[in-house]
Each structure stands twice: as structure tokens, then as C-alpha cells.
């Protein structure tokens, strides 16, 4: 059964949770590439008045597993936050192919981690969101964003995502399942 849900209610639900990483509630927005994670995370961030750290802020070569980027998050963000200290990382510029500006991650009531493998079993997550959409729609979104010349890489990446999610059982552990093909600005809760 699916049901449309209020952004306000979701934010209240998250705020009521105990912190999961030092004094911070980590909200993971996970799911396959092109499913709508970034759009959802941005809207939730506005409701929570929270920062979003995107997996796309870190380099992940096409030939590495989807989880490869997360050590940067652990070292630069989660470890300091767990100690009650701010984190900091250098954003990777995919277009330029190099690191860009430094991004500060202050200690705050909530932080949203958005991207493939953010809701991993070992992460200090207070609340895990899984966003899904049909594979064809996800591929079309990815190619519209990144260019049709990357179609072969996206196909390989989708297979690597499937393997990661199966091994980690990410979807089955999510607190909230969402339909990423729904109308932008709304979200449909598939299951809690």
C-alpha cells in the first residue's frame, strides 16, 4: 500500500529520534542512481534545515564498487561528528576532474547523506530512506544529466549497484521506502 505523506510529519519523525553519530541524527537517502535521491534529499534538507552531503561530492571511478567513496565520509565527516567536532571535506568537481573547494560540516541536529550506499549496514544512521524508480526511467535520467556517451558505464554501474544492494540488504532495512517516479515535490511512502 502506498500513501502520500507530509514533509512536516517526516521532519518531526526524524527530529524525535535519538542522535546516531555523536549529537547528530544521520539521515541516509539511498537507492540506485537516477532514482530521485538528490531531489528528495534537497527537499527534506529544507524542511529539516539540514545540510546535505552528496556521494557525487567524492570521486568514485567507474570501475570501483559503489561503496568505495564512503571511507572519505567516515574519515572526514562521521568520525569528527561522533566526537562532537565539525567535519570538513574537499568537494570533487566531476566536470573539471579535480578537487574543488572545502566544505564545512558543522555539528547540527541532523545531517543528510545522499547517494548510493549511504544507508550501509555499518553506518551510524538514525533514519534510512530508500528511493526507487523503474530501471529505464533511472537510466534516462542519468543519461539526460551526464550525457548519452556514458550509457555503457551507467549499465555497468547499475549492475554493480545491484550487487552492492543485494549484499548489504539495504532496501529491506530502510525506515522509509519511496517511489522516486512520483510527481516532483511530493513523495509517496511505499512502506515504513
Image (tube, grey):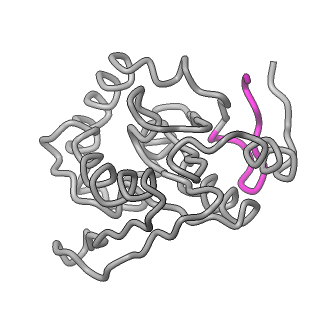
Snapshot quadrant of residue 77 = bottom left
Say which residue appears at 21% left-offset and 52% top-offset: 60
Q: Nearer the viewer, residue 167 or 125?
A: 125
93 lies left or right of 13: left
- Image coords of residue 170 (percent x, y): 46, 24
Q: Does residue 26 lie above or below 108 as drawn?
A: above
- Residues in magenta, as a range: 180-192
The residue lying toward the viewer, choosing from 163 and 110, is: 110
Percent position of residue 183, x then y: 74, 49
Q: Quadrant of the N terminus?
A: top right
Residue 190: x percent and y percent? 73, 26
What residue is rendered at 26% in x and 80% in y?
100
In the picture, measured across the screen, residue 25 lies left or right of residue 95, that is right
Q: Quadrant of the C terminus?
A: top right
The secondary structure making up most of the magenta span is loop
Residue shown at the point (48%, 59%) measured from the top left? 84
Residue that protrudes farthest toward the bottom in the picture? 101
> Relative to residue 179, is residue 25 depicted above or below?
below
Q: Residue at x 54, y 17 (%)?
A: 172
Q: Position of residue 160 (x, y in %)?
A: 26, 30
Amino acid at each position: 500500500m502506498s500513501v502520500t505523506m507530509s514533509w512536516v510529519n517526516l521532519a518531526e519523525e526524524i527530529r524525535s529520534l535519538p542522535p546516531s553519530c555523536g549529537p547528530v541524527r544521520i539521515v541516509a537517502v539511498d537507492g540506485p542512481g537516477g532514482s530521485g535521491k538528490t531531489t528528495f534529499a534537497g527537499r527534506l534538507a529544507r524542511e529539516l534545515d539540514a545540510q546535505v552531503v552528496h556521494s557525487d561530492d567524492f570521486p568514485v571511478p567507474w570501475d570501483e564498487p559503489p561503496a568505495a567513496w564512503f571511507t572519505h565520509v567516515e574519515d572526514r565527516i562521521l568520525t569528527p561528528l561522533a566526537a562532537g567536532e565539525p567535519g570538513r571535506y574537499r568537494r570533487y568537481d566531476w566536470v573539471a576532474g579535480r578537487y574543488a573547494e572545502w566544505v564545512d560540516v558543522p555539528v547540527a541536529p541532523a545531517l543528510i547523506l545522499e547517494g548510493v550506499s549511504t544507508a550501509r549496514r555499518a553506518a551510524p544512521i538514525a533514519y534510512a530512506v530508500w528511493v526507487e524508480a523503474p530501471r529505464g526511467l533511472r537510466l534516462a535520467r542519468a543519461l539526460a544529466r551526464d550525457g548519452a556517451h556514458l550509457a555503457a558505464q551507467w549499465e555497468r554501474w547499475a549492475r554493480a549497484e545491484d550487487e552492492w544492494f543485494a549484499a548489504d540488504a539495504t532496501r529491506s532495512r530502510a525506515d522509509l521506502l519511496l517511489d522516486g517516479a512520483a510527481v516532483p515535490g511530493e513523495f509517496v511512502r511505499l512502506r515504513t
